[in-house]
Amino acid sequence: MSTPLLEIDGLTVRFGGPGPLARAVRRGVKGAPGGGVRAVDGVSLTVPRGGAVGVVGESGSGKSTLMRAVLGLVPPTAGTIRLDGRPLGPRRDTATRRAVQMVFQDPGTTLNPARTCGSILAELLRVHRIVPADRVAARVTDLLDLVRLPHGVAGTRPHRLSGGQKQRVAIARALALEPRLLIADEATSALDVVVQASVLDLLAELRATTGVTLVAVSHDLDLVRYLCDTAVVMRAGKIVESGPVAEILSDPAEPYTRELIAAAPTLSAAPSGKDRQ
Ligand SMILES: Nc1ncnc2c1ncn2[C@@H]1O[C@H](COP(=O)(O)OP(=O)(O)OP(=O)(O)O)[C@@H](O)[C@H]1O
Ligand SMILES: [Mg+2]
């Protein structure tokens, strides 16, 4: 069997270790071993190469913290993360950092407002020497094509773009580095429902055209159905349910998952996956 692209094993991330204040508080609090918040609590998760896995759960369930640990932005308290069989430690070389890219919820805050979209992309290509200097401009155009943006966007600053266009630039920026794993953390939840559907379609298309492995984080299981084969459901830092998305949706084993499905605004009112623009 081939090694999975991403293997997370027994991952725990605890915030706010027992400093003097935490220790004082803990004396009066039961059920907080080690102190602080266990944002991620013994999570194991495998993502096959070329696959798409959804991570679903209510606000505060630990989804983003899990992904931030994969990116190396927060240190695990326990457990291991492997990419292509190699352990990912807190200190990573440039190639390893390139291999995992994340698209965040609010593209407005992650794109430099002082630069044009073209120069944001060009700089990344140059700094990481993705293509020779004389191919940078052509590659910027290719990237805009890839995310279905008009070439004119290259000369435009991010704040002049719509939310959906900004998110496409953010996706182009992530793909510029030719990652092996793309993480979309609530990448469409700040967008209105029609734009959300078109960005979801783009991500699905990119999966097919680039072969990139995808982890899609959302509070909405119905939404990950459009992108993912399998999903895990997180609650209070733990995975409480996992399996094929369709099965979880049609026959949730956990009452929590049932609540989550009932609480989420549904996309089924929007046009079906295939014929959205
Ligand atoms: N830097 C931090 N310091 C302390 N606590 C944190 C930190 N980041 C997250 N937490 C806590 O960890 C828990 C999990 O947060 P996290 O952001 O991972 O949840 P989430 O599932 O992504 O939620 P949302 O759906 O709202 O994005 C929460 O209790 C949160 O308050
Ligand atoms: Mg989050």
Image (cartoon, grey):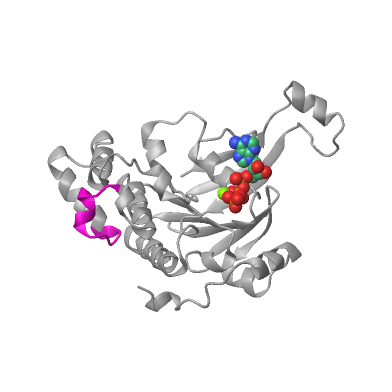
Q: Position of residue 70 (x, y in %)?
A: 52, 42
- Residue 164 is situated, as x and y percent measured from the top left of the image, at 37, 59
Q: Quadrant of the C terminus?
A: bottom left
* Residue 155 among those drawn in magenta: yes
The residue shown at (46%, 49%) is: 104
Residue at point 27%, 59% (across, down): 146
In-front residue for pair 269/273: 269
The residue that appears at 35% across and 61% down in the rendered structure is 206
**Residue lying furthest left:** 134
In the image, residue 273 lies at what x, y percent? 44, 75
Compared to 22, does 83 lie above or below?
Answer: below
Q: How many marks?
A: 0
* Residue 222 visible, this orientation: yes
Residue 113 lies in the magenta-colored region: no
The magenta span reads 145-157
Residue 172 relative to residue 261: left or right:
left
Q: Is residue 190 above or below residue 137?
A: below
Residue at image point 52% right, 64% down: 224
- Residue 41 appears in which quarter of the rendering? top right
Q: Is residue 63 visible?
A: no
x, y percent for residue 13 = 64, 38
Query: Could you tell whether 167 is left or right of 82 in the image?
Result: left
